[in-house]
Amino acid sequence: MDKRRLVIIRIHGKSGLRKGIKDTLNMLRLYKKHNCVVVQNTKDILGMLKKVNDYVTWGEIDQETLILLIKKRGKLARKTSLSEEYVKEKLKISMDALAKDVFEFKRELKEVPGLKLFFKLLPPRGGFEAGGIKEQFSKGGVLGYRKDKINDLVKRMI
């Protein structure tokens, strides 16, 4: 499969979801609206994305956006923010090096003890695109696959 990291953002809330959709979103660790996860691009993940296509948006994350996401939105237990000191103490590397290693598949986020494997984001500054929240990105909306344009959205939501 493609050797890139994907970022997936949940757009829709909890109301009116079928059990299969809820279960798939939970397997992806997308528990609430505006949560995001960083995953490896595999056939399993792509199958899940096909199932929840009408509830999420996703694309390939770049290294700069991944560094920002980990630094600004990385959380430990009890709502404690991930800090440079914590990463240095536990892994003996800087946060920038951690993000670079994750991006290059040398490490996984789950190697950081106590790190929550999802990121809580804010609604995007300036709102979503004009096409509508129920439309696919390819048709001018918000949902679905957006290639590398996902990085602009993530930066507006950090």
Image: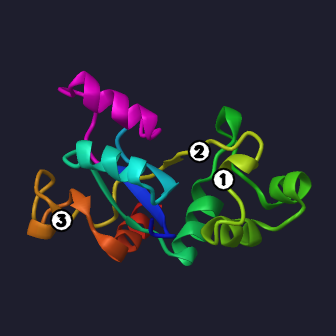
Stretch in magenta: 11-31
Q: What amino acid is at disc 1?
A: Leu
Q: Is residue 25 magenta?
A: yes
Q: Which residue is mark 1?
A: 109
Above or below for 87 versus 126: above
Q: Are marks 3 and 1 in contact (CB under 8 Å)?
A: no
Q: Is residue 28 magenta?
A: yes
For image coordinates 51% across by 70% down, the residue present is 3
Q: What amino acid is at disc 3?
A: Phe
Indicate the position of residue 11 as horizontal and vertical percent values.
28, 48
Q: CA distance from mark 3 to mark 1?
A: 28 Å
Indicate the position of residue 51 as horizontal and vertical percent values.
25, 42
Q: Are marks 2 and 1 in contact (CB under 8 Å)?
A: yes
Indicate the position of residue 25 as horizontal and vertical percent values.
36, 36
| Image side of residue 145 versus residue 108, left or right | left
Q: Residue furthest top?
A: 19
**Secondary structure found at label 1:** helix
In which quadrant of the rendered view does residue 21 lie? top left
Can you see residue 53? yes
Q: Which residue is mark 2?
A: 117
Q: Which residue is mark 3?
A: 137
On-image quarter of the N terminus: bottom left
Which disc is residue 23 wearing? none
